[in-house]
Amino acid sequence: MAIRVFSFILFLLLSSSFLQVTRCESEAGNDVVESTEEGDLGIVGEDVQDFGGGAFGPAPGVETVCVFPKNPSRVVTAGEESELLVGMKNDGESTLKVISIQATLHLPFDHRYLVQNLTIQGFNNATVPSSAQAAFPYIFGVNKFLQAGSFDLVGSIVYEIDQHPYQSTFYNGTIEVTEPGGLLSVESVFLFCLGVGLVGLLVFWLHGQIQRLSKKTKRAPKAAKVEVGTGTRDASMDEWLQGTAFTQSQSKSKKKN
């Protein structure tokens, strides 16, 4: 099974260069159709057969796969065209006729919220015979006013087998939408200005704290000087020394002064 899927994807990548030529010729005129062994391919734009908006299931024996040939990271710039390849493998008994490829954009956490209906790309005379495989290009563009972020892309291909409509989902995954202008987006400029403002406030606060500490250091009182020989003596000690040579010498020194 893994080998079959790998060969299917390899077929898509090898077919991408041929489909580029087919798409350019189809844009020059809607009557131009390129024939291949897998079927006839003619892109006719948005003029697509209407099935009444019903949801159909996939046909038995039909497999689909999706490849982003020029954008493996699946990063889409808002307002610019992006391309993917849809591969189909028909293991059924009848030839299928490809009607259209369409996709929608949803919020990643809840698919009930539809963000945008993308291009409905119709085909003319695009068939895949039994026991064959084919690849079809799909060009879509995300609204240029869409905010950058992650969104879920759901793509499906509509086809007919024996005049019965079917629909297969070829991709249901996340893509990353970026704003035009590269690094100088509105969000990046806002975040840069916010960061600069926070750093400025932090520097201002630190400067105020340093000045406050320096003022407190200047206002601190000086330590009192210690004078030797001016201490008071205990009264009981003076009474005990009364009449001794020590008290006599003390009295003589006071008279001299």
Image (cartoon, rainbow, N blue to C red):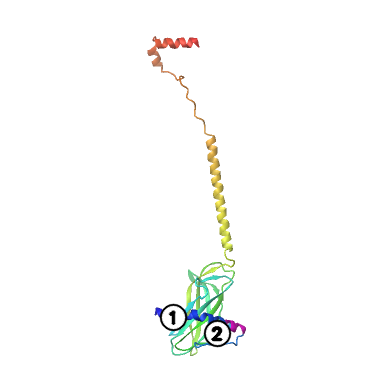
Q: From which residue to which does the magenta span run?
A: 23-28
The reply to whether the magenta stretch includes residue 190 is no
Q: Residue at x 54, y 35 (%)?
A: 218
**Which marked residue is nearer to the observer: mark 2 or mark 1?**
1
Q: Circle 2 is placed at which residue position?
A: 123
**Mark 1, residue position:** 7
Q: Is residue 225 above or below residue 19?
A: above
Marks 2 and 1 close (CB-CB < 8 Å): no
The percent position of residue 204, horizontal first and vertical second, equals: 56, 47
Report the residue that reaches farthest toward the left: 240
Label the magenta part by its dominant secondary structure: helix
Q: Amino acid at mark 1?
A: Ser
- Residue 61 pos. (x, y %): 43, 85
Residue 240: image quadrant is top left
Provide the secondary structure element on which disc 1 rests: helix
Q: Residues within 10 Å of mark 2 (few under 14, many from 20)?
A: many
Up the image or down, 209 lies above or below 84; here it is above
* 60 on left or right of 46: left
Write the residue at 57% across / 53% down. 197
In the image, residue 74 sits, relative to residue 192, either above or below, namely below
Query: Is 30 displayed left or right of 37 in the figure?
Result: right
Q: Is residue 208 visible?
A: yes
> Disc 2 or 1, which lies upstream in sequence?
1
Question: What percent of the width, then of the height, locates residue 173?
Answer: 48, 73
Q: Nearer the viewer, residue 212 or 110?
A: 212
- The numbered mark at residue 88 is none
Please tell me whether mark 2 sits on a helix, a strand or a loop. Answer: strand
Query: Taking 75 as reference, is 228 above or below it?
Result: above
